[in-house]
Amino acid sequence: MRVAVYPADLGGCGHHRMIWPARTLQAQGADVRLVMPADHDQIQSWWMDGDDGPKVLDVMVPDADVVVIQRPLQNTLVAAIPIMQAKGVKVVVEIDDDFEAIHPQNIAWHTVHPKFSPSRNWHHLLHACQLADLVTVTTPALAARYGRHGRVAVVPNMIPERYLDITREPHFDVWCGWSGSVETHPTDLQAARGGIATAVRDAGARFAVIGTGRGVQRALGLAEAPHAAGWRAIDEYPEALAQLDVGVVPLDLIPFNAAKSWLKGLEMAAVGVPFVASPTAPYVELEAAGAGIVANRSKDWARELRHLLTSADARAHFAGQGRSCAKRMTIEGNCEQWWDAWCSSVNAMSAV
């Protein structure tokens, strides 16, 4: 079986869902070709403008049995799918976010909304999923959104094995922290309803953000501005995350977050950081597997975080328990899930 994998970006989504699984499978002997976004042999098509938009005339078909495309939002790319299928290539669409449910205050909302972006939007993505031989997603909620036709496989997010060997540098203060941006998480920090700020204050801890930190003090109600570590390259990110003593993953209980995976918490667990998260279905499941603590009400956030921030023994216990859980959820140990899903598209009944 020959599989060509086309990641959409070089960030976390591209690496976790496409690049790292593909490279791991390559190392294990699978016939996988990884085509990076800047490569000249990206899927090429010939098209012309028509009254109803661009019309794809032909596609340079990749030398593969299966093509895996990540979040095809562009109309010309979606139009290329049935042409590839007609030439004998099976098409898998990979999605890890519910684009239709992006919060209007999220800076990405207007970039994928049909009203503001006619050629690149979630309408085209939905059409791509209808055409695909298989859709792969990270959560059951995404499967319900994009895989109503039944040609869908849930492949949960995993972490690279190397995360398990990363250690924390010695430091004196106790650091509680979050990774992210208010620009893309406009209502998430408020989900803790002040409980994070209360715990940080009561424990005499400090708060840090991997990111710019803009808007975080106000959203959390912190007494002072957090330390902003800045954005890190994908290969440097886990080391930065590991410097936290306790992590937080607050999520507003909205449809977009209901479809999100457990990745941020799993990354924290893998690098030895105990964390508290909102009770979305994936985090309830991850807690049951041994990583993280879920909290909903303000007093729950304050209680759980205060315990972790004031007790080195509690931090060590939950860090060890979380890391043991993460050892079972590595890309290297579970890459057959990607391979099995991609290969299953060959036997799927095509939509065209």
Image: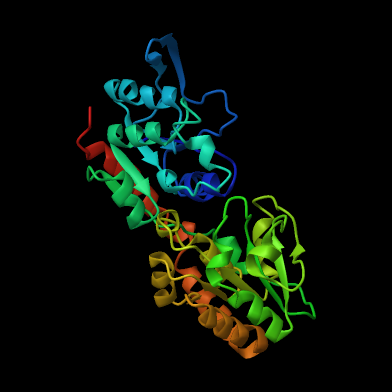
**Image quarter (top left, top right, bottom left or bottom right) of the C terminus:** top left
Q: Quadrant of residue 271?
A: bottom right
Can you give x and y, in whole percent of width and height, for residue 109 in the image?
52, 42
The color scheme shown is rainbow
Can you give x and y, in whole percent of width and height, for residue 155 in the image?
37, 54
Can you give x and y, in whole percent of width and height, for residue 49 in the image?
44, 10
**Image quarter (top left, top right, bottom left or bottom right) of the N terminus:** top left
Q: Is residue 228 above or below residue 14?
A: below
User: Can residue 166 be seen from the camera position used here?
Assistant: no
Q: Is residue 271 above or below residue 307?
A: above
Q: Residue furthest right?
A: 172
Q: Quadrant of residue 329?
A: bottom left
Q: Residue at x 56, y 72 (%)?
A: 193
Q: Residue at x 45, y 77 (%)?
A: 290
Give the side of residue 69 with respect to residue 135, left or right: right
Give the side of residue 141 with respect to residue 28, left or right: left
Can you give x and y, in whole percent of width and height, for residue 270 in the image?
56, 68
How many discs appear? 0
Q: Residue furthest left?
A: 349
Q: Nearer the viewer, residue 55 or 303?
A: 303
Q: Residue at x 52, y 24 (%)?
A: 41
Q: Nearer the viewer, residue 225 or 260?
A: 225
Q: Quadrant of residue 161?
A: bottom right
Q: Residue at x 44, y 75 (%)?
A: 287
